[in-house]
Image (spheres, grey):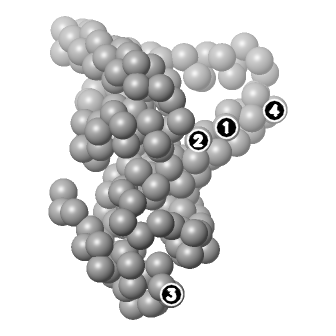
Amino acid sequence: MDALDPGLIARAVDGDRQAFAELVERLHPRALRFAHRMLGDSPDADDAVQDTFIRVWKALPRFRVGSPFDPWFFKILGNRCRTALEKRRRDMTETLEPELAAEAAAPDPYQLDDVHRVLARLPAEQREAFLLYHVEGLSYEEIAQVTGAGLSALRMRVKRAMDTLRARLVEVTHA
């Protein structure tokens, strides 16, 4: 993962549209990867990324140049993903009978055939912490800025995610 050029960020903060377009180009693959792993391969993930870039553009004047950009960006993206997950959950519980909604939300280890499916079944908080730490390479301190969670809680989320991933992958490979 390439670090973003602080000069590029500063130009974007100053309203340079070309610099912002370059930021979008550089961040888009990471943002899509994160959103698709948080929300699954759905239009919701694409919408969350698009909405994130709109929000980033509007919020850039308030960004403190020299501050770490990744945690700030992923906080906005994470919020958009959590909002989409909550909306999906509300829609599901409104349209399905309560017992069917619970069944649909329950993980079925016999249908999991790869890491992405296992990852998709993690609780959102664990999945987010796991992705930010292991995929995006953010430190626990940066993840705390993104999520607002404490360091010990984040370490526990990542550990639980790893434990669950290992256990479910063993189930899948031995099924």
Q: Is residue 150 above or below residue 14?
A: above
Mark 1, residues whose alpha carbon is within 10 Å: few (<14), some, or many (≥20)? few
Whole-angstrom CA distance, mark 3 to mark 4, is: 42 Å
Whole-angstrom CA distance, mark 4 to mark 1, is: 12 Å
Nearer the observer: mark 4 or 2; the answer is 2
Q: Is residue 35 above or below residue 89?
A: below
Give how far across and how far down residue 23 sits, in percent. Answer: 36, 75
Q: Which amino acid is tagged 4?
A: Glu
Q: Which residue is mark 3?
A: 15
Q: Which residue is mark 4?
A: 94
Q: Is residue 166 above or below residue 88?
A: above
Q: Which amino acid is tagged 2?
A: Arg
The mark total stands at: 4
Q: Mark 1–mark 2 contact, CB under 8 Å? A: yes
- First in sequence: mark 1 vs mark 3: 3
Nearer the observer: mark 1 or 3; the answer is 3
**Where residue 86 is drawn, which disc sits there?**
1
Q: Is residue 161 visible?
A: no
Q: Which residue is mark 2?
A: 82
On the rendered image, what quadrant is the N terminus found in?
Answer: bottom left
Whole-angstrom CA distance, mark 1 to mark 3, is: 33 Å
Q: Which amino acid is tagged 1?
A: Glu
Q: Mark 4–mark 1 contact, CB under 8 Å? A: no
